[in-house]
Image (spheres, rainbow, N blue to C red):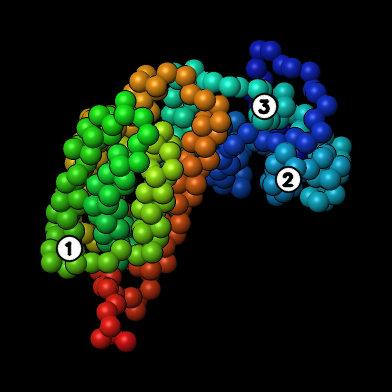
Amino acid sequence: MTAVIPQPDIIDPLAELDYPRLRHCTFRELSSDQPMLMIVGREHFEISEEEGTRTALLTVKRYLDGRHTIPEIAKLSGVDEASVRQIVSTLHEAGLLRRETPTEYIPGDVFAAQIDASCEMWARQIGFHHLFADLEHGDLRPEVFLGLILETYHYVKSAPKHISTAIAHCRDERLVPLLSEYFVDEWNHAGMLLGSLVQMGVPEEQVRSAHPIIGTWSLVNNLCEIARQDTLSYIACTSLFEARADDFEGGAASMRRAAVAAGFPEDSVDPVIRHMGIDVQAEHASLIGQATRILGDIPGRQAHVVVNNLHDLKHSYDQFHDQIVQYYSDISNYIPRVKVDYFSL
């Protein structure tokens, strides 16, 4: 397969890559007759099928993990070695293979910019989950849309829990005011989502007594664990889950279309959209930039911890959306979910 990739002005000669490893990326297929998109941060590359197949390329990609030689990749993927070398060469020339350099410290502004770019990529990848397109097209039960709003209510309601955990475990007092201000901004936003659920026909007392699905608990618990482990990681996570100005209008329109497709009044989601707008106005997605201006240069070792925690959180959102589809698509499940007590046994 030949990748059609814009070439940089300066191309390094192909080095002897014993164990090639791809930079973190997202692949997106719009349709079988259009080029596949490869997204790396804010860069987008088109992969066209001039030779070979997409399946072959993605199989090779699986082994570009820094643990396999090119002959091993060829053997494991079933793609001939010459083709593997061509793929690796093309990726290398485009700067898409991981290059490690000894780094004791990373300038704070450079670190913040890279985190922001990566979170923009991951946030949009989260939005590629089939849940959202299926809701807009009316391909899921109306209860699934109701479940999305209900579980988002539980998630937003949990903000004081994970923010206060970050404050309690913060090891650098310089960051406490930033976290405290964030807590004040977020502590009571769940009421707006409660308003949407009531407009959608769920009695308020049932919303308040509802029990989250396990996917929601897992997401919240992961945030709390990250907050306990590393304050900077938690602050970086806000770049992933807080609303972004560039995505606000599109997200609001998508939410309204999904509500109508599910049979709910279009304005029933206005409180949810208002919550998104408040977060955008508060610029909560930019907290990492504020933190690095306080901290200065970031130790290289800590930077790796931050990135891995962010990547785990991204997959927590995938699991969260998977389980919303799973639980609320089942016609036998209680909605809202109720706690199971001793007398239910």
**In terms of secondary structure, where does tag 2 sit?**
loop
Tell whether label 1 touches label 2 (CB within 8 Å).
no
Q: Mark 2 vs mark 1: which is more N-terminal? A: 2
Q: Nearer the viewer, residue 50 or 314?
A: 314
* 280 sits left or right of 323 in the view: left
Q: Quadrant of residue 50?
A: top right
- Answer yes or no: is residue 277 visible: no
At which x and y percent is residue 5? Answer: 66, 27
How far apart, in angstroms, are the residues tagged by discs 2 and 1?
47 Å
Residue 63, label in figure: 2
Q: Amino acid at mark 2?
A: Tyr
Q: Quadrant of residue 71?
A: top right
Q: Nearer the viewer, residue 115 or 162?
A: 162
Q: Amino acid at mark 3?
A: Glu
Q: Give the crowd class for mark 1: few <14, some 14-19, many >=20 residues within 10 Å.
A: few
Q: Amino acid at mark 1?
A: Arg
Q: Mark 3 vs mark 2: which is more N-terminal? A: 2
Question: Which residue corresponds to mark 3?
Answer: 100
Q: Residue at x 72, y 23 (%)?
A: 93
Q: Residue at x 80, y 30 (%)?
A: 17
Q: Nearer the viewer, residue 97 or 164?
A: 164
State whether residue 229 is above or below residue 120.
below
Q: Mark 3 vs mark 1: which is more N-terminal? A: 3
